Image (spheres, rainbow, N blue to C red):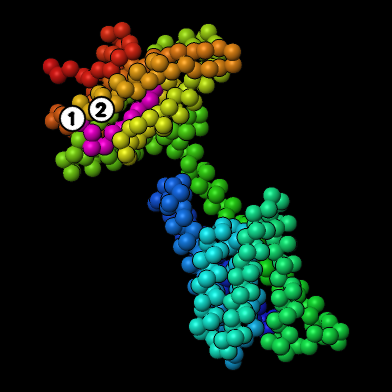
Amino acid sequence: MWNIIDSLWSSLAIFLYALFLHGIALRFLREKRPTWFTQPNKQRLVHYALGSYYGLLGVYFIIRGLRGYDFGIYTDMIINILLITALFGGRGATLIATLIIASGKILITQNYSEQLIYAFFLIAFYFVVTELAALKIREFQKFILCNLSIVPFMLYYLPHKMMIPLDWRSGLQWIIIFAVSFLSSFILYQAARFVTAANKQIQELRYFSLHDPLTDLANYRYFETRFTQLVKKAKHKEQPLSLILFDIDWFKQINDSFGHQAGNHVLSTLGSMLREHAFPKNTFLARIGGEEFAILLPKTSEYEAIEFAEAFRIQVEQHVFHFGQKELTITISAGIASIDQEHIQNSDQMQSFADQALYAAKNAGRNRVMKKPLY
């Protein structure tokens, strides 16, 4: 029995190390490819990769659990793989892990009839844990229910595998085995919860350090970094890049007449309108000041940028902003600059040209789109 307990603890250390690597990989991916966690198709790929990772970990435990080498560890750890994946990885990841482990169990080990029974159990357990994971109860309650659902299989499968009879004389041994099994499962659950929570907090901190919380657009810090990158790329590849700077006309009057909450409502709604507008793919949107916004349009000429800005100006002019019982209308003024103009060499110069065009639009009467005249 003690060699089995020792095997469980050694396998627990391996599993914890796998969780640690999983956390580092997801953190790195969130930093380098943040859209992979917001776009549904990319999210599915991440989940399938996660399921494959834990499925292969299960195959590793199967190999280590062969008779004559650390026998006894694999049943408990494989069940924990499906439990943890279901609670923290989702249904798709758990399905992938289940299929890989079940296939490995049949192909690697002998006695196919027995392994088929085991594979069918894994598939049944997949349906049980994924349904339990979907319940609208506390996470820890899900964990307890998933653990309880394992008990019947353990009572059926383990006695002849561990050569410990299932009777009252072996009661203490079984109590110790189940206690160690639950404790190892609890440790894995807490470790997975910690890794998930830590990664989520880091992601949120990173997101809000780069985005404006009111409009959910990029903030000025993110805009500066992205703007510099896009200008360098456009110059290197000799592609056009256009910048639209616009702000809300007479915005101070809205705050003075209706209050700052009304002004915040207008800004928030305007952010939503920007995200939903039919700008080209890879358009970068930012709020760079109080009521000032920026739109970066890669591979877009000055003429095309003027058309996009004009279309959005008209949409804003025609939109009614509802705030409580009040109906507000606003207009915007916009200035355009494009890197396809030979005299623009860097992002600072380009932003300066767009600023000058914006001021020209203001001086010309507002509610219009202008580019900086060449003279």
Span shown in magenta: 292-302
| Res 145 quadrant in image | bottom right
Q: Position of residue 89 (x, y in %)?
A: 56, 58
Residue at coordinates 60% horizontally, 70% vertically from top-left? 123
| Residue 173 visible in the picture | yes
Q: Amino acid at mark 1?
A: Ile
Kindly report the distance in space between the C-alpha atoms of the residues bearing marks 1 and 2. 16 Å
In the image, residue 118 above or below residue 339: below
Q: Nearer the viewer, residue 250 or 82?
A: 82
Residue at coordinates 58% horizontally, 89% vertically from top-left? 111
- The local secondary structure at tag 2 comes to helix
Q: Earlier in the sequence, mark 1 or mark 2?
A: 2
Q: Which residue is mark 2?
A: 305
- The local secondary structure at tag 1 comes to loop
Q: Which residue is mark 1?
A: 344
Q: Position of residue 336 (x, y in %)?
A: 26, 23
Q: Position of residue 215 (x, y in %)?
A: 47, 29
| Residue 80 visible in the picture | no
Q: Nearer the viewer, residue 20 or 283?
A: 283
Q: Residue furthest bottom?
A: 68
Q: Amino acid at mark 2?
A: Ala
